[in-house]
Image (tube, grey):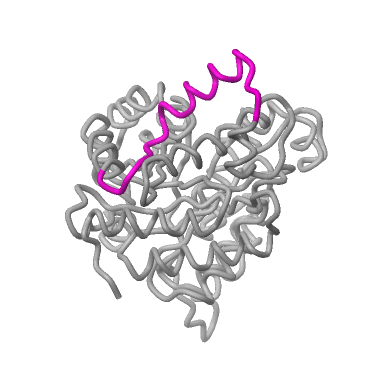
Amino acid sequence: MAADAAEEIRGTAHGTAPVPLSVLDLVTVGAGRTATEALRTGVDIARLAEARGFHRYWVAEHHSMPGVASSSPAVILAHLAAHTERVRLGSGGVMLPNHAPLVIAEQFGTLEALAPGRVDLGLGRAPGTDGATAAALRRTDRLNEGADDFPQQLAELIRFLDDDFPDGHPYSRIHAVPGPVQGTSPGGVQSTHRPPVWLLGSSGFSARLAGTLGLPFAFAHHFSAQNTVPALELYRDSFRPSAVLDAPYALIGVSALATDDEKEARRQVLAAALNMVRLRTGRPGLVPAPEEAEAYDFSPMEEEFVQSWNANVIHGTADEVRTGLDDLQKHTGADELMITANAHGGDVRLRSYELIADAYGLPTA
């Protein structure tokens, strides 16, 4: 096993946290706010994550959603690389079927050159949007083809990252730059290091594939909680040691929001749930303010959805959130918790991560 690669994947718990804590930022845009403000908050959260000992900060690819400003993870990560020095930066994830593997290899090779040794490449096989938008992204109506071809696309991407297509392959003379070819060229001093690849999933498909390939796995507990334990068990049962890992390593995405007052947490979580109601019923928009959510007349069906959705959102005071996170980690055996804080205001999201860091006694810069 490549010990340095495994070291980059596995984090170290700080303070009293049972496992490493990380951040998944959807770069949410609230009503009355702009994408510029949301992206500035992202920088503030990344800096806080770095200062307080969170292990990594990831952004997720979404499209055609007014309330999510993370359609271009590579662009955002390049910006964050210029504003941080130590925290790992990555995608949670890039949706591989939306892109040519060579393009992703070039983008993340560039990010690796900008922030050596601290870039993660998390990959998903969903479109990150609705079918019509996916068709526009991929310039095809055959959307299932991309998901079905995911293992082949993944293999191609890894070969571009490693620059190791065999002789005679149609791509053997094509190189992702920046990348290893620069180190093997005459006079080259380019590092052969590349970003570690993670597989993301919300069901068993990617769990089994990640295990079979010996790759780290990230599960979307925050929107597929009923599948978390079965998927992690499948990943661990399927795991085969590789040059990357000699033992399975799984993180889970967790929706959690801490506030100074328990009532305020309920208000913020209700607003985020209303946003999900609108998204799931084909009415995506900006994240509503808590006042709008409190005044909204939920139908019985919507109320049922809100209760079901919020049952998997850990929220309350810092101590309550810490207890919920600890219980979830014990239940799932996750090796890392990646926390996403969804709220109308960036100040609320930033404060949540600060409170969670305080609750675990994470170090201050």
Foreground residue among 20 and 257: 257
Q: Is residue 143 left or right of residue 176?
A: right
Q: Give the image location of residue 119, x and y in percent.
A: 46, 63
Q: Give the image location of residue 200, x and y in percent.
A: 47, 39
Foreground residue among 110 and 190: 110
Q: Tell me if residue 60 comes above or below residue 308 in the rendering.
A: below
Confirm whether residue 184 shows in the render: no
Confirm whether residue 306 shows in the render: yes
Foreground residue among 301 and 56: 301
Residue most extreme to the top: 300
**Which quadrant of the figure has residue 108?**
bottom right
**Which quadrant of the figure has residue 182?**
bottom right
Q: Give the image location of residue 310, x and y in percent.
A: 46, 29
**Magenta span has 39?**
no
Q: Tell me if residue 19 comes above or below residue 313 in the rendering.
A: below
Q: Residue at x 69, y 28 (%)?
A: 145
What is the tally of numbered marks visible in this picture?
0
**Which quadrant of the figure has residue 321?**
top left
Q: Is residue 63 left or right of residue 194?
A: right
Residue most extreme to the left: 16
The magenta-colored residue range is: 296-319
Q: Residue at x 64, y 48 (%)?
A: 68
Q: Residue at x 54, y 43 (%)?
A: 154
Q: Residue at x 46, y 41 (%)?
A: 199
**Magenta span has 317?**
yes
Q: Tell me if residue 222 comes above or below residue 21 in the rendering.
A: above
